[in-house]
Amino acid sequence: MARSNLSLTRLFALLGRELTETELRERLFRTKVEVDAYQGTEVTVEVMADRLDLLDEGGLAWELQGARGEATGLPVAELQPPLPQVEARVNASVDPLRSELAMAVVVAPEGSAGLDAGLLEEVVRYQELLHASLGRGRQSASLGLYPLDRLRPPFHYAMEPMGQVRFVPLGGTGELGAEEFYRTHPMAAKYGALGHRETSCLTLRDDDRTVLSLPPVLNAAGAGEIAPGGRRVLLEATGTRRSRTREMVGYMLVPFLARGWKAHPVPVHGPQGTVDGTEVLAPRRVPVAASALTTLLGSRLTSTEIEHALLSSRLGVERPSGTLMALVPPWRADILASVDLAEEVAIARGYATFTPILPPSTTMGRRRPERRFEQRVGSVMLGMGYQELNTQVLLSGPSLGRFHPLEESLALRNPISQEYSHVRSVLRASLLDALARNTGSGYPQQVFEVGPVLTRDPKAETGSRTETHLALVDAGEGAGFARAAAVADRLFSLLGFEAPREPTEVLGAVPGRAARLRIAGETIALLGEVHPSVLGELHLQVPVCWVEMDLTKLERLGGLQHVGRDGEARP
Amino acid sequence: MNEGPTPSPGTDLTLTLSALELSLLQALRRSGGGPVSEEELVRSTGATPDGVRGSLERLRSKRLVVLEERLEEVLRLSDRGTATLSRGLPERRLIRLLQQGPRSKRELLGEELSEEELAAAVGQLRRLGKVQPGEVLSLTGEPPEELPEEEALRRVQEGGRPGDDTVVPRLVKRGLLIRDQRAHRSWRPSPEGLELPLEGSGPTSLGAITSDLLRGGGWANARFRPYDVRAPVPRVQGARAHPYREWLRQVEEVLVGLGFEEFRGPLVELEFYNNDLLFMPQEHPARSMHDMFFVEGAEGQGIPPKLLRSVAAVHEGRPLPRQTQPLSSGWQTPYKEEVARRVVMRSQTTAASMRYLATRPKPPFRMYSIDSVFRYDPLDATHLIQFDQCEGVVGRRGLNFRHLLGLLTHFANALGIKDVKFQPTYFPFTEPSVQGFVRHPKLGWVEMMPGGMFRPEVLKPLGITAPVAAWGIGIGRLAMVALGLNDIRDLYLDDLPRLSTSRV
């Protein structure tokens, strides 16, 4: 979700009326906006990632007007012609960076004062929100706004040797060469990766060779600086994808069009041919599959009701040859296909109007047989007086490394902290950590857990296997090999298996006091006494013994034949 | 339950005494009414210290004995004192060095004595007149076999007190001794305890029923000593299921009762199942290093080629194989197989849904999976890097959005949550999408039931033709509401005393 601080004064001015906090909260709950804070003349909203148009006061005003029936359909229906000579030329040199360009011009309404302080503030704020969200911090696309009145079209987008480029960066006072700019300017360090290659950089100039900006990093002072009073603004987006640059310009239209400005297309001539610029501004036509839509929503809506709902959503509607077609404006990039219109209709009518119903149930519910087996094992452990624990799968390297070689375990490439850097491959490591947190809780302590462990397996699809283990640990005077062996014997006996103990060596156990239990040649369980050196590291001053059993293997070896199905009598 | 008559206040108090209580009272009366220490009573009765103390407390609650408690000073060696005693006091070490002949102060400094220790040792020995002052030090006369400080430390170590108390402040100041206080408990009979007739008590007043008593039949002619039923008893400790896991099992019962079949996917997952199949753009911010955990050195393999081609087609906005029209405009970006093969800790149980749907279940079907997911979230009272989600998937011909709302409402109701409301939301893989809010008695409306109808871009590549509703509930948060927890970390509680005593 993206967060936006909106001016209530400007929002109410656009709406033509004021709303109480309750009205605003209730109305927005029915949309993809949540009111986070409402303070004085400002409201902070959180907007779902697919409705970036609602981050702007204009977009939000359109939405609210539609919902209240005060205005419906496309906010701007008329497509304007291109302005004379206002076009762009993309030089073939841009190709290696695969940088795309989209443009549009917005013109202030006749008789208005043009760009005022409020609109300027909103435009700059919204531009930054778009950079952060859709533009992925300018890694995917970036936006520039220019005072067209002070520029001489056509515009030229090219990759130029840095030595030929000099400009005054926005906010600066002195002229810089591009080389120095890329070497020293903080904005270049942050956003420059996509704007240059070795000794060349991207430039946008007007026909007087004035540098407008060094995309995607920074505009030039003056030529790249919109100011109060401006009547014609050039919107430009560069990025790695054509569709994304068009979306950026499409969204950036919203604050202007909501205030009565008009948008004109800007043709772009490039090495691949010419696009006339209308594709940035013209509504897309998405067919309305009315029958599928009503089936999906489970509501018998007439074609007129669907049309009315779409108009309330500030979409356009037309019926060429009788088929209902939605007209989707450029700031609604979230609508990809007919199915998206179903949600528009549901929102317009209100989710609360869809009465929940239960679908007929003809399926038989059941848990996995493995789970039932694991629960049976858990019951045996509870019966033996062991407290059940619920520990986390991630743990620290030292915690795991005491009991299992780290090179055989999974590690995270980007751990959030060293405390959670590894994925456990043995369950007893988690239980010993728990004991270490309970040294003041009195003894004896007997705990167990049935839970997942993960081990490396280069042949597996994910390079690892998830298995379910049982681990139990016993701490206190008298906790030794004999206790662990006795518990293991009882477990195996109750589960219907026989597995003689064989001596083995296990990391973290006292040599000569560890054993494995095998069935059909496979090691099913290990048990032993924890070595005093390990106890010392964990600050445990009582003896500890453990058993760890691979339930996944045991299930495979016939453990499941005793569990039956849910609802069936069991032997 | 028939509890029988309640003993009246006039009930014979003597009969309520256990054998040990009787012995203790007799021992105290033999002392002539003066105080007797608890240690002495342990010795005289031969019972355990805990048994004696418990019985004395019960006698006190019957107003038969009086406790006299006073604090007394005890001395003990500090860690430094213990170490010094084994190595020798600095003055003893200085004596040993000077016994080899006069030495300059510079020569004396080294492993045996630090500068600070040398100064202290010289001061002590000068005070005793055992060392000649000056730059070169030498002993005067025979050094004592045991210095007063040594004698004091030795005695304290042996559990006694120093013979010469004047050295104690110096040893405390030097950090070698620590003064502690110990409560000294003595008991004496109260006037009621002195007057209580003890005749008739004893062997004919029975305490615990034993096997010997039952076998011998001796109980038939004896009186059973009535117990003080209000007396405190030891707390029973016992094992129990972990409260959160127990609650999750109840949730499963609800789901099984609703006809859901359990499914489980791997915790370590390919991005293909975790994201791509879910129509999440490969450059989606939720797929970055700041939102998911990547597994070091692991590379995925074995993605079914046909499925991979179909997923690539919907991402790029191309028609599926053997189709002429694309399902949608897709994400208009080249699909990368190397991204699909990246190995991550599963960030959503919807990955398990994809694994399940990839098995091409025949409609109608209902699947659930309650399992862990991992997110790159800072740890606090409401966020964990590992938490559980409850995934649900329902597919059948004619399934619709109202059914989804109905299932979510019914599920919440079955868990005892009455108030539910829904808000539009966004997920790349569902349309319409919904967020379910439930009302928490303290927190108000809390969002915790996200769901939606899977998009065609998700279902068609999997070959699923029936509509499918799905949800991935943050079941841990729901558990917090149900279990009355304020901190999500308590779901992984391993505090054994708390686990043992928390309510069922």
Image (cartoon, rainbow, N blue to C red):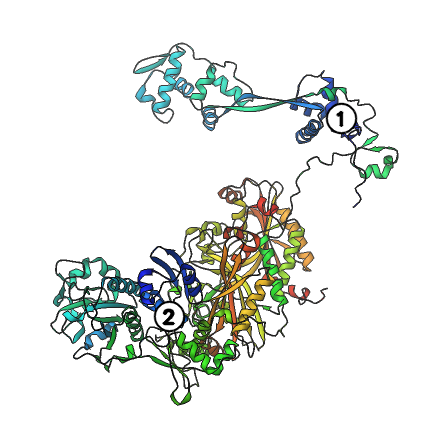
* Secondary structure at numbered mark 2: helix
| In this view, B126 is above or below B263 | above
Q: Is residue A513 visible?
A: no
Where residue A147 appears, as percent x and y from the top left, is 18, 68
Asked whether the viewer can see residue B40, the reply is: yes
Q: Which residue corresponds to mark 1?
A: B22
* Residue B189 horizontal/vertical position (percent): 71, 21
Which quadrant would the N terminus of chain A be assigned to in this image?
A: bottom left
Q: Nearer the viewer, residue B469 or A284?
A: A284
Circle 1: is it few (<14), some (14-19), or many (20+) Cα within 10 Å? some
Quadrant of the image containing the C terminus of chain A: bottom right
Q: From the viewer's perspective, is the residue at label 1 or at label 2 nearer?
A: 2
Q: Is residue B7 above or below residue B169?
A: below
Q: What is the quadrant of residue B54 in the picture?
A: top right
Name the chain letter of the residue that bears numbered label 1. Answer: B
Which residue is label 2 attached to?
A65
Q: Is residue A315 left or right of residue B396?
A: left
Determine the residue located farthest toward the front in the rendered image: A17
Q: Are marks 1 and 2 in contact (CB under 8 Å)?
A: no
Left or right, A531 with reference to B141: right
The amino acid pointed to by label 1 is Leu
Residue at the bottom extreme of this rendering: A321
What kind of residue is marked 2? Gln
Q: How many angstroms separate mark 1 from mark 2 (CA)?
A: 89 Å
Front in this rendered view, residue A295 or B20: A295
Q: Chain of mark 2?
A: A
Which residue is located at x 34 percent, y 26 percent? Answer: B110
